[in-house]
Image (cartoon, rainbow, N blue to C red):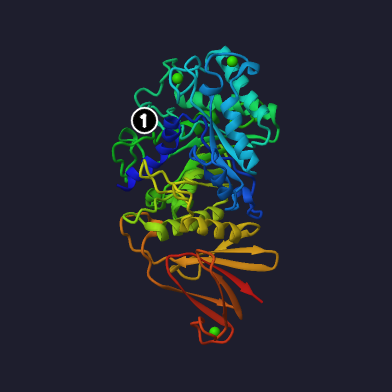
Amino acid sequence: MSKLFAKFLSLCAFRWLVALGFCFLLILPASARADGPITPDFFSMDDGGVTSPNPALTALARATGAPQMRMALYWSAVEPANTTPENYNWAFADAYFERAFSADIIPLAYIADNPSWAANTPCGPIDTTDPGLRAEFAQFVGAVAARYPQIKRWGLYNESDGSRVSGHSGGCFGDTVNGDLNANGVPDYAEYAEMAGIARDAVHQANPDAQVYLTVAFDDFDSLTCPRGYKCLPPSHFDYNFLPKLFGYMAAHPRPNNQPYADALAFTYYDIYGVYWENQRSGAGLHGIQAKAAAIQKRMQDAGVAFPLFVTETGEDSQPAWIGDEGQSRCLAISHVRATASDLQMVVWWTFVDNPVKRWYYGLVDANQNIKPSYTAYQTLFQQLNGWTYRERWTQSKTIEGYRFTDGAKTKWIVWSNRARSDDKAPCAYPRKKARFTLSAKRLRVTDLFGNVKTVRDNRPGDLDPRPGFIRLKLDGAPQYVLILR
Ligand SMILES: [Ca+2]
Ligand SMILES: [Ca+2]
Ligand SMILES: [Ca+2]
């Protein structure tokens, strides 16, 4: 069931839009953070095709603090018949993006859905052996980047490692039938690399401030490529071998002047898959999203390529039969905080609004535009992380998972109990036994998951440590933000 949840998730954004006739989805861009303070563009949410058209929802979305929403741009809508940019059909894209711009939201864009004249599938390669088609693709991507200079990140498809045309979530370059959907004798992973290189050149030429990012799911592996120890439950969707083959191709075919094929790599992360990544050698000592990032980094190192990473989709369903509102809120905070410790440039929460028709309750806002507890948790998270710099993990005891941040002379720990017991749902929401967290301090300002603040003074109520100069707090599975006051 948990696997199905994630699959549904990865499909939903795409299918939902298609069903509604929307042409754009949101995807991501990330920005450079390496070792610096966390900035607002670490935060993004998925538009789902329903947020941008609704001013009330865009206002709510912007009020979380996140300045970006992931949105798709469909090539098939802009250029349904092959033409030149002055004849492109911009009507839908303009309206869709303009609503975001007017709400002070920057689209984290991705390009998807090939027109039928350009490729034999909507989700797979163009014939990259055809110089004419390469030029057409460059023309299109360049025109898009030039038209929307506010957009700094352009992704190529969604989850490009999809292994099935039928039921794809935006990409199907990981086709496992013969790996050559367009039957041109060139492996489709190689064509994805080629298209990325073309897109990067075109985007950079049109807008030097903009970037191109690759997209993969790299989870929910199909049974044909299922790695040992991974539960590949049908229907599964993604080719385990796509990513290493992609990296291998890039390494074996350096671009002119050693230009990279892309500026970043985005992946999808759902916590039900986290234990697998933690159990890999590369995941030792890491948690969930960190372990998956490390697995990708390991493959990049093995191949000799390097891309900054970010997460285009992560989310959890709040239905009571799954992990509920509290569990969803915990997962939201935990995944983001963990991501800061792995230097992920951005995390996109999938998705902003519930979709009851699909029975997807991953939203921070329900279908009636009421905020959910996770909305408050997100606002709190934004306020607690924005401007702070990640420094180190808590290593003094294994009963606590904790991360230290600083802002100038100020120090903050974000901590929760690490004493989890599996309930076979999302690990980030597992029930956790109490743990105790002790700091040398006279006063602490403790903010809970939902922004409720209390001050704890040494040897006053709330301090469980009788020693003067030390304060001990009780932790459970809900992250607490603990600011040390002087
Ligand atoms: Ca054209
Ligand atoms: Ca091919
Ligand atoms: Ca004390």
Q: Quadrant of ligand 1?
A: top right
Name the one closer to the observer, 358 or 213. 358
Q: Secondary structure at mark 1?
A: loop
Task: Examine the image and state in which quarter residue 108 appears.
Answer: top right
Would residue 476 be found to the left or right of residue 58 on screen? left
Residue 212 visible, this orientation:
no
128 sits left or right of 223 in the view: right
Nearest the eye: 371 or 262: 371
Residue 181 seen: yes
**What residue is shown at x 59% (from left), y 38% (from top)?**
107
Q: Quadrant of residue 386?
A: bottom right
Q: Which sits in the foreground, 300 or 466?
A: 466
Q: Position of residue 273 (x, y in %)?
A: 38, 48
**Residue 426 drawn above or below residue 134:** below
Q: Position of residue 305 (x, y in %)?
A: 56, 37
Q: Mark 1 belongs to which amino acid?
A: Gly
Task: Residue 157 in the image: state x and y as whole percent.
Answer: 50, 31
> Measuring 38% from the left and 35% from the top, which residue is drawn there?
238
Count of numbered labels shown in the rendering: 1
The answer to whether the beta carbon of the residue marked 1 is less than 8 Å from any atom of ligand 2 is: no
Query: The C terminus lies in which quarter of the figure?
Result: bottom right
Looking at the image, residue 380 sits to the left or right of residue 362; the answer is right
Q: Residues within 10 Å of mark 1 (few under 14, many from 20)?
A: some
Q: Identify the residue at image location x=52%, y=40%.
A: 266
Residue 47 picture location, percent across and down = 52, 41
Q: Which residue is mark 1?
A: 167
